[in-house]
Image (spheres, rainbow, N blue to C red):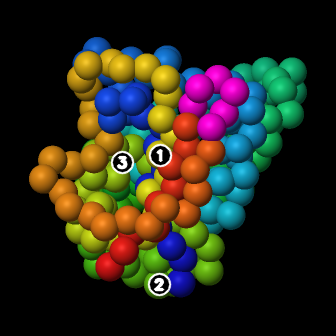
Amino acid sequence: MGALRYSVITSLDGYTSDAGGGFDWSAPDEEVHAFVNDLERPVGTYLYGRRMYDTMRYWQDPPGLDSESGVIRDYAEIWQGADKVVFSRTLAEPLTPRTHVERDFAAGTVQALKDASEADLSIGGAELGRQALALGLVDEVQQLISPVVVGGGNAFLPAGLRLDLELLEDRRFGNGVVLLRYRVLR
């Protein structure tokens, strides 16, 4: 059975994007990107909402990939090699290989994916991540905190949620980003 990871880059005040929808402040440098690649390498399936999928499908065929750094090429290969499940009522059919569309985000569907998977799953996007946390589906939270306060926007955690966590790892990067990795205690 695969574990469901909620991995996200946030501001110090807990937002994945600012009030205007911007997230340029979260772009990882080479060191952080290489670390993220290693976090993502064991993931067999990505779970996305429609907006996150539209953002991430860039990695299927990034322009000028041959001239990019090894870290960027490595991430594209990791992303292309994983399965994707997109939860969307509006996406008629997948736009990338290894992708399946589900109409509704339901606890039973996600639990069945976890049960059937030999590899870990990763949930992408704050909206889906908040839902998965509230439904008790997330096994691990991986938060990369950027050294910025944005004052509002898309929150990383749902309001009113209570979770007990066990710290698995913490790490500081040269650019001021801090990783906190927790196991969700049941």
Q: Residue under label 2, please give it.
A: 115
Mark 3 or 2, closer to the camera: 2
Q: Which residue is mark 3?
A: 49
Task: Compute the Cα span from label 1 to label 3.
Answer: 19 Å
Q: Residue at x 62, y 80 (%)?
A: 118
Residue at screen point 47% across, 84% down: 115
Residue type of the residue flagged with mark 2: Asp
Mark 3 → mark 2, Cα distance in angstroms: 21 Å
Residue 178, x across and y down, in percent? 55, 37
What count of labels does the image hold? Answer: 3
Q: Residue at x 86, y 33 (%)?
A: 70
Is disc 2 surrounded by few (<14), some (14 to 19) or many (20+) residues within 10 Å? few
Residue 52: say if magenta: no
The circle on residue 143 is 1
Q: Which residue is nearer to you in this view: 21 or 178?
A: 178
**In this picture, residue 46 sits left or right of residue 68:** left
